[in-house]
Structure formats: structure tokens, C-alpha cells
Amino acid sequence: MTRNSFLAMLTIWMAVLGLPCSAKMYDFNSCIYNENDRDIVANCSKGNFTDVPQGFVENVTVIDLSQNEITSIENMSFPYILKVHTLSMYWNSLTHLDRDSLKNLPHLSKLDLRGNKINCTSSSLPPGLFRGLPLKRLLLSDMNINQIYDDLEYAVFHDLNQLEELAIDLPPNPTFGVGFGSLTNLSTLTVRYCQRNNLNTSAFEVFTKFNLTAFQINACNKGQVDTNITDVFPYLDILDIRNTVNTDLSQRLINLNNYENASMQRISFLANTARYGDRTEQCFTLSKKYTRFLVTMCVSEVYLVGNRIRIIDGGALIQPPFSQCLRVLDLSHNMILEEYHLLQTLFFFTHLVSFHFEQYEKDLKQYNDYIYNFYDSYSIFQDTNGMVWPENEPQTCVFSVSAETRDSEVNPQSESNVPAYLMLAFPRNLTSLYFAPALRPFVDIKHEVYFLGTERWSKVVFSNCSVVVYNVTSIFGMRNLQSLEFSGNGFIGSPTTLMKSFPNIKNLSLNRITKGFKCIDNNIESVLGHFQHLQNLHLLDNDLTDLPRNVEKITNIRLIDVSYNSIKELSVGTRKRLDAVAQKKNISVNLRGNVLSCGCSSLEFISWSMDSLVHFVDGHHYMCRNDNGEIIHITNIADSYMKIWRSCFSFFWLLFSICLFFLLFLGFSLSLHIARNVNLLKRWSVKWLGLDFQLHFKYDVFVYHSSKDDRRWVCSTLKQKLEDERDLRLCIPDRDFEPGVYTCEEVLGAINNSWKTIIYLTQTFLEDELCSFRLSSAVYLGDNLKSDRFIILFSDAVFRHPLPPIINQLLDEDNRFPLEKFHKSSLWDQLHSRILSKD
């Protein structure tokens, strides 16, 4: 086991067992490790560390500890040797580093200590701190301290003989001592001078012995930098002076006389204004007088940003060799009035690759105190310093161009004689153009426009310029264009002719069309149907309520983006058309930003979106409004559908369940009632439906009499007159009941199975208590037995005595016949009629 492995294992076990290890914990799991082709990176940024974490793997090469709360780097912060070549401690609270704190990082070449609280003194950076380290890049700028000591200690820098780049904050009256004389390999010096003093040339005399190639100063809109500061750096390749006061751009340009006829990579003069503190109204005219030395130089990149330039004289920048060498030009954040003229002059820069110009209204009205910093990242892992710009203002008018590498060669443009009312020529190597004017100099396009030098252009953005394009307009020179954004503008008439100017378009954005979008919406096939390569169509913020009809029929369409419109749901017709297309090819729709409807009436649409083959882009960002007017954010459409379904149908199913239970209860009760009153129902059917009662009842009449009565009249006379002569079916207990004493059940059964019942009421009947009891029991147990079902044959003698209650209940004017009158044949006929009656 090697010594390093032993130390690593010992550190880990001490931390795990809770033993003191320089008061630090084992933080292996607090960092994220990433591996690429060159490095193993330990990303420990934003981890709330107050000390350097322990337990790094031995072969880690990059450690990022930026944006923590570490106050010092101690001797045991790195207890064993690591292969780290890059260490970032950006934006911590470091006040000092111990002398031997970095000795176990023998390969360290890049160290970023920006944004801490370190003074360049022996107490913060002790002598010998960097001894033996192959440091090539050291960043000590942007310190978060109120005061910087006047004298820069040089002992700590004595060991940095391999250093190539140094970034450092300067005190009010700085002097780089002889200790910096050991930095013989230094090529890039970046200083931040945030003092209200004058930075003199004499401060940099020690560097006259070096071939410094890059010199950068940031004066933080406070410091004044001598105009002849460059005298000590005759061999610069990069010169960057920014955020200075009391020296304007004209003086900076004139002092380029030391570089007359020289070649340089970059010149950056950012926010060099003749003012101190308060606002000034002075503006600047960029004339040949001030550019007379610049135009003799061969410079690849020029940044003249934030210098209050109002006018650029013709010919001030378009003279060779300067115009032939320039590849990058930036004139942003000035006060230029003739903005459109800048586009017309780009053609003279024959090798121009990138042009950047953005200007806001606040740039025209007052001085912008924005400070342009050098670094746009929180670490030193990038090798180039990109420009850092203010954020774009909303609804900025933009004309931008980019060129992308393509698999096939571009088709050269035919420069035939085309009668164009407007012609713009650009350098053929221009691959990046960003033009955002404050005054919106573009006019309505009523005639043809001809572009030259645009063969390599693949993407054009022309947005928010309030331009109206007429329907007869054609644009020549854009046949190779693959992506076009025409947003924040308008049309008069159908732009079919305009769209045919871009036959190879793959991506088209028509967002926020200010005028004439309805004409596009209603004629989408004629306007865009000719595109054979169009894959992505963006129609944002056009107040659409549905997809344009037949937009899915565009030949190779893959994405229809209708975000941020007024769509509540897609119509049934749109859904059917999308489904038909989705059966043949992949198609996506983006509805983000639309307040969809997720009420009960939209459940069919939500269900369709779950089952359809159409892909919904950014579906987890969708939102909808329910029937209560509440906005709901949809993260999972299936879960949302179930919640909406339950909210819509829970009350319905509750009512349905109650009704169903009620119906079941009613049906059960009705069944019981029917079962108990089946004979009553049969009698009701006969009475009201006109049915033949003889088909539904076993007997026509039941003859009930006392068993003690004389049976001869019942069994002979009554039987003969009704059964033999008139064909009625009689039920006579002595004949049709089981032998023996008949019961109440037999009496009740005979009554229910007979259409009518004759009670043979005699004195004997009244005296027979059992007979009355059977009749009473049968009537009370019967199915709603009424008097119209009974016929009483009585003798006159019975009315001389009290009658049983059951007889009084059944007596009626129409249902009693005296026995004494049955010698008359007519009475038998009346009895027969009464039996057959349905009353």
C-alpha cells in the first residue's frame, strides 16, 4: 500500500470513527463526481461548506468549491497528494491560506480565488505558498473587501516563474514591485482598479521586460486610466480597457499610435467616457480623425461598446487594411442615430464573421452605469473570456442571422438582374449577425427585397420591429434558409408570395403577428402548403382558439407549436384530422401556456389526449381551469383526468346510487305487494282491461253457507238454476272442499279463486258462530275484499236480529236478494246478471 493510499484510508477512518481530523468531516457524498475524456471533476459548489471537504479520490483532476462559506485553506485541508490541476475557490469567504496548504497539489496549474476577502499581504498569502507549484493561471481579482493595502507584497509571487495569466485587484496607488520581475512567462495581465484615483503608467514599469501579449483593465466606472498606459506594452495582441472615467473613446483611439500598422487579435474599449461620477450629456462622433491609427492596423476583433457614440462618419472604419482583416465587430449600447446605415456598411468588411449591435432607449436617453465584467462564469474552467452583456429588454426589435454547418453544400445564389427596390449586401463569410436597434429603423416592405452574400445563412430572426409586409412582396437571396422567425410584425393580404421566397425552410415561427394573422389562419394550406421540408411550425401568441384548419396536412410537418394562445380544447374535427395523420407519421402539438378547460364538458378531450398517438410537448407544464374557475397545473394528465372525472361524476353517481337504491326498495316493496294482492290485480285487470274473468278465475261463484243449514236448497235449487241452467261454475263446500270441517284457509282460497261469492244468510247462519268467524277471518286476510264481490241471499227473518259486523260491512243496496222471492224467474236472471257484472 502506497503512502498516499494509507493517508487517504486513515483520513476516512478517522472521520467515520468520529476522531478529530483537523476539525473536518468526511464529505465524500457531498460532492458530485463527473468524468470526461480528460478530467475527473469533483463538483462541490453551493454545498454550504465552511471547510474544505475531505475524502477526495486520488485521481481527481478538477475540484470546484465555488460559492461556499470556506474561510481558510489550512495545512491539512488536502492531507494527501492529489492529481488536481484546477482548483476553484470562487466566491467563498477566504481570508488567508496557510503556507503549506497547497503542497499536496503538485500538479496545480489553475487557481481561482476571486470573490473572497484576501489582501495581497504576507498574512493572507504567506511567502512560499506557491513554491514548487506549476501555476499558469492565478485569479486574485473581484475581492469582497473594503480596503486594499497600498503596497503589493511581492514575496509570494517570487515563486511563480511559470505563471502565464494573472488577474489581481489594485490598491489606490499601486506599484508592482521587483518581486513581480520573476514572472518571466507572464503573457496575460488583468487588473481591476475600483479606486477614485488615477492609474499611472509608472505602476506597470516592471512589466516592460516581458513580452506581455494581453492587457486588460476594469476601472469599475470609478477609476481614471492614463491615456498612454499602453506605452509600456508595445507587443500586445489583446488590449481591453473598460469602465473608465475622465477619458473618452477619442483619446483611447488616438493613443493607438504605438500600434500603427501592427496586427492584433482584439481591441476592446468598453464604456470609456469623459465623466466622473455624475451623468454627462457629452456624446461622441467617430470620425476619421480618431480612427486614423486604427484603420492602419490588422485587427481581428473590435469591441466599441457603451462609449456614447452618436455618429459614425462615412469611411471612418471601412478603410483597408482594417476593413479587410476585421472578423468581429461590436458597436452595442451607444447612441447611434443612423442605425440602419450600419447594416449597409457591413459589406465593406470583406472577411467579417460576426457583427453585434444592440441599442436600447435608455442608451439614447442617459448614460448607462452598467459595468462590463471580464468573466461570465463562476469558475475558471473555460479557457476564453466571453463578453458579458446586459439582459435584453422585452419586445426588442431584432434582426439576427446565424449560419450552421450542413451536410451538403449550399447552393450559390444567382445574381441575375432582379428589379429590387431594396438591396442589402453582406460579407459572404458572415455567420453571426445580431442587430437590435432602439429606433426601429425598418419601414414597411411593399416591394421586392434583394439580399447578397447570404448563401451560408441558415437562420434568420426578424421580430418585434412593427413592420408590415404586403402580399406582393418577394425576398430574393434566401433560398438556402432553413429557419425563419418573423414575429411581432404584420401582413396585409395573404403572404403566399413572401413564403415562396424560402423554399427550403424547416423551422418557421410566426409569433405575435400584429396584423393579418386571420388571413394566414383561414388559408394555411395556400400560404404554407408549398413547403416540402417544413417540420416545425410555431404560432405562439396569436389568440388562436383551435389549430388552423388542415395545418397538419403540410407534407413533412412534425411539430405544431400553438403555445400561449386562447385554446381551451381542440375541436372534434381537429382531433380526427390529427389522429389520421398520427397513424402515418409522428406528430407533436405544444399547448403550453394555453388555459385549457378541464371542466366536465372537456372530459372527452382530456381522454382523447391520453389515448391519442399525437405527442403533447411539455405536457407536465400545462394548466387548465375547472368549472369553479380555479387554475390547475397539470403534472400528470392521467392523474388529472381521474381527479376531474371524480369531481364531475361523484355527485351524479351519488344521486344515481340513491335513486337505484330507492328503485330497488320500491321494486322489492311492489313485488311483495303484488305477491300479496295477486287476486286483486287479476280482478282489476278484468274490470278495467275488459278481460274475460272466466279465463282468470277457477270458479264463477263461491257459495258460502253454514254447515248446519239445510243443504238441499243450495245443492239442488241453487245448483240447478245457476250451474245447470245458466252454465256457471259453482264452488260448493260440501261438494268441492275436502271432507270434514273446512278451515278459514279453504274459505279464503275459494273466495280468491272465484269471481263472486254468494253468502247464504239464514237464521242458522247467524246462530253458527264458527261460520261467522270463518267468513270474518277470510275477509280480513283477503286481498282488499269489498262488498261488490259478495252477493247476499237472505231470509226476512235475519233482519229481526242483530247482524254480525262482517255482514254489516258487506251489505249493499245492490248485492242482496231475498230468498222468499226466488220463486220468480226474473230474480234468478237478476242474480245471474249480478254474478257476471264487473262492478
Image: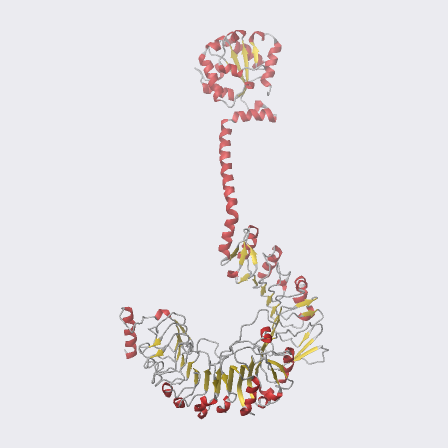
Q: Tell me the residue at 44%/76% (across/down).
A: 379
Work out whether residue 475 or residue 134 is closer to the camera in this orientation and state it: 134
Estimate the x, y position of residue 21 in percent, counting from the top left.
Answer: 28, 73
Task: Give the image quarter of residue 550.
Answer: bottom right
> For this view, does 42 lie left or right of residue 789?
left
The total of numbered circles placed on residues is: 0
User: Does the image show residue 72?
Assistant: yes
Query: Residue 48: image x %, image y %?
Result: 38, 69
Indicate the position of residue 66 as horizontal and vertical percent values. 41, 74
788 with respect to 194 (left or right):
right
Quarter of the image for residue 684 reads top right
The color scheme shown is secondary structure
Considering the image in quadrants, where does the C terminus appear?
top right
Q: Residue at x 51, y 49 (%)?
A: 647
Q: Vertical placement of 10 versus 773: above or below? A: below
Specify the quadrant that holds the N terminus. Answer: bottom left
Picture layout, residue 761 above or below residue 783: above
Camera-side residue: 10 or 548? 10
In this view of the protein, which residue sits in the foreground, 292 or 261? 292
Position of residue 110 measured from the top left corner of the image (x, y, whole percent) = 41, 81
